[in-house]
Image (cartoon, grey):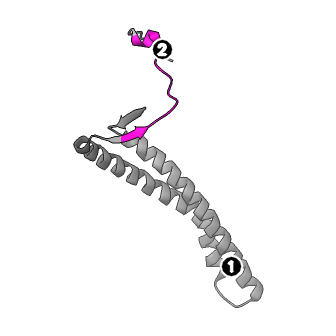
Amino acid sequence: MNLTLKKLGVLSLGKVMGCIYGLFGLIFGAIFSLVSVVGGVGMMASQQGGDETWAMFFGVGAIIILPLLYGVLGFLSGLLTALIYNVCAGFMGGLEVEVDGIPAAPASAAMGSTDRL
């Protein structure tokens, strides 16, 4: 069965992309934090006289800053993507999606019943 996606909810896509990108930011922030803290500890252990305090502080800050930054940018890019898609779909007719396994509407829905699930 083919369906056509004619419009995206702008705020809906923004929220979903903000959440997804926020999770990516959390993953990248955790990796960055781990590398920075290990590097700072390594500099302290070798006593090279580097500024290991800044490296460790920057690494721990990344686990807070990156998810927030990625989440906000993901939200904004989701809004922009949905707006652009809606304009283009108005001209081009939308995106065709092939789906399988959608059950047929019950007879009560076909007769105009107002029952909701």
**Residue type at tag 2:** Pro
Compare residues 86 and 1 and report the one nearer the observer. 1
Is 21 on the left-hand or right-hand side of 26? left
Query: Which residue does the image show at 48% across and 14% down from the upper left?
Result: 106
- Give the x, y percent position of residue 6: 32, 37
Query: Which residue does the image show at 22% across and 44% down from the upper left?
Result: 91
User: Which residue carries the number 2 mark?
Assistant: 106
Within-10-Å neighbours for mark 2: few <14, some 14–19, many 20+: few
User: Which residue carries the number 1 mark?
Assistant: 39
Q: Secondary structure at mark 2?
A: loop
Is 92 on the left-hand or right-hand side of 9? left
Within-10-Å neighbours for mark 1: few <14, some 14–19, many 20+: some
**Residue type at tag 1:** Gly
- Give the x, y percent position of residue 59: 62, 70
104 drawn magenta: yes
Q: How much space separates mark 1 and mark 2, taking CA atoms?
A: 62 Å
Residue occupying the far left of the picture: 91
Magenta stretch in the rendered image: 96-110
Query: Which residue does the image show at 51% across and 23% down from the upper left?
Result: 103
Compare residues 9 and 89 and report the one nearer the observer. 89
Specify the quadrant of the image occupied by residue 87. top left
Residue occupying the far front of the picture: 1
102 drawn magenta: yes
- Give the x, y percent position of residue 45: 77, 84
